[in-house]
Image (cartoon, grey):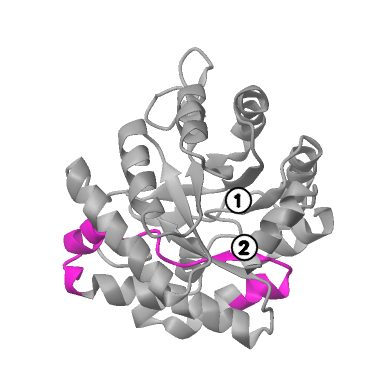
């Protein structure tokens, strides 16, 4: 039985699993310079020791899944950054550094998830079939590097989400979907670009996605998302919310939620049936340490 299969058995038995906190904003906070138009994706090659250390710090605090620092290493983002020729290297090393951290911490049962997103910092999104091809290549690189599963992050619109999902599934690895949500003007909970969350969940159910997470979503909106998932999602649920803000390409840490308050919210989400929990942008090692007590 693979490590992933063991973890899913635990989830099926009702256990709670903790994932890591932010990697991109955390390496930024620790001084890793950004790539123009590819945010904090450059760390795997420019500052691998810091990226590895962040993974190790989360593992030390009890994370059982760590996500590679590859949110910003899509082919189109790296093309916009002028480093498309390093597409394979960024994605391979992103996964390898997480594996190295797991080995260094002697946590063989921890899983490494390859993080995949289609976000664009320039707004120049590729055509859907171009996106399909590049995600399939990215997923294959991650699988070859040793990822245990893939986690789609910031899925904010239906068409690109489904193309990204199908392409990632071609790798043969299990694929979890992370949805970023906010309410529309009527209060209906939607994907970030405005399509109803209920529709996204129906599509993901039909495609056999094993787990859906609400991620990179404001803490204040998580409960409303869980209200929708209760009635429209048959599988296990994850949450990793964000805190703080984003301005001029930088994450703003001045107004982040305290570790105590984040854990307090997380306890409520866990009581509502969430089984996989961690944090996204702005959530630091201190938050995960406090969260561990709740889990």
Element carrying mark 1? loop
Who's the residue at 73% across and 70% down the image?
61
Classify 225 as above or below 50: above
Return the disc, 2 or 1, that comes first in the chain's sequence: 2
Q: Is residue 214 left or right of residue 170?
A: right
Q: Is residue 164 magenta?
A: no
Q: Residue farthest to the top?
A: 186
Distance between the Cα atoms at labels 2 and 1? 32 Å
Q: Which residue is the site of mark 2?
A: 4
Circle 1 is placed at which residue position?
256
Which is nearer the eye, 174 or 226? 174
- The residue that appears at 51% across and 55% down in the rendered structure is 174
Residue 222's disc number: none
What residue span does the magenta drawing correspond to? Answer: 56-85
Counting from the top left corner in percent of width and height, residue 49 is at 48, 85
Q: Percent x, y for residue 168?
A: 38, 53
Residue 96 screen position, x and y as percent: 46, 79
> Which of 243 and 206 lies nearest the eye of the viewer?
206
Residue 64 position, x and y percent, is: 68, 66
Residue at the front extreme? 1
Residue ID at (73%, 51%): 11
Q: Quadrant of residue 249?
A: bottom left
Picture quarter containing residue 140? Answer: bottom left
Name the quadrant of the N terminus.
Answer: bottom right
- Identify the secondary structure beneath mark 2: helix
Q: Is residue 43 visible?
A: no
The correct choice, above or below, for 270 with respect to 79 in the image is above
Quarter in which the C terminus is drawn? bottom right
The crowding category of the residue bearing disc 1, from other C-alpha atoms within 10 Å (few below 14, some 14 to 19, many at least 20), is: some
Q: Is residue 83 magenta?
A: yes
Residue 108 placement, left or right of 143: right
Mark 2 Cα shell of 10 Å, populated few (<14), some (14-19), many (≥20)? some
């Amino acid at each position: 039985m693979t490590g992933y299969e063991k973890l899913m058995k635990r989830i099926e038995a009702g256990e709670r699993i903790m994932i890591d906190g932010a990697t991109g904003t955390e390496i930024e906070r620790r001084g890793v310079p950004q790539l123009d138009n590819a945010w904090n994706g450059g760390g795997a090659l420019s500052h691998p020791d810091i990226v590895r250390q962040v993974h190790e710090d989360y593992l030390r605090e009890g994370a059982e899944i760590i996500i590679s620092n590859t949110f910003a290493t899509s082919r189109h983002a790296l093309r916009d950054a002028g480093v498309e020729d390093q597409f394979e290297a960024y994605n391979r090393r992103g996964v390898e550094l997480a594996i190295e951290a797991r080995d260094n911490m002697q946590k063989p049962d921890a899983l490494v998830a390859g993080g995949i997103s289609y976000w664009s910092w320039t707004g120049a999104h590729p055509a859907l079939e171009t996106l399909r091809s590049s995600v399939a290549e990215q997923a294959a690189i991650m699988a070859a590097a040793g990822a245990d599963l893939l986690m789609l992050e910031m899925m904010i619109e239906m068409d690109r989400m489904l193309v990204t999902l199908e392409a990632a599934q071609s790798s043969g690895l299990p694929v979890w979907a992370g949805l970023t949500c906010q309410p529309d003007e009527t209060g209906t909970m939607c994907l970030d670009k405005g399509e109803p969350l209920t529709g996204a969940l129906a599509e993901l159910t039909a495609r056999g996605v094993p787990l859906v997470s609400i991620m990179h979503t404001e803490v204040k909106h998580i409960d409303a998302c869980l209200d929708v998932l209760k009635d429209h999602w048959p599988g296990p649920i994850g949450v990793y919310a964000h805190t703080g803000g984003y301005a001029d390409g930088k994450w703003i840490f001045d107004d982040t939620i305290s570790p105590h308050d984040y854990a307090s919210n997380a306890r409520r989400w866990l009581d509502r049936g969430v089984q996989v929990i961690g944090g996204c942008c702005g959530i630091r090692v201190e938050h995960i340490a406090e969260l561990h007590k709740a889990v």
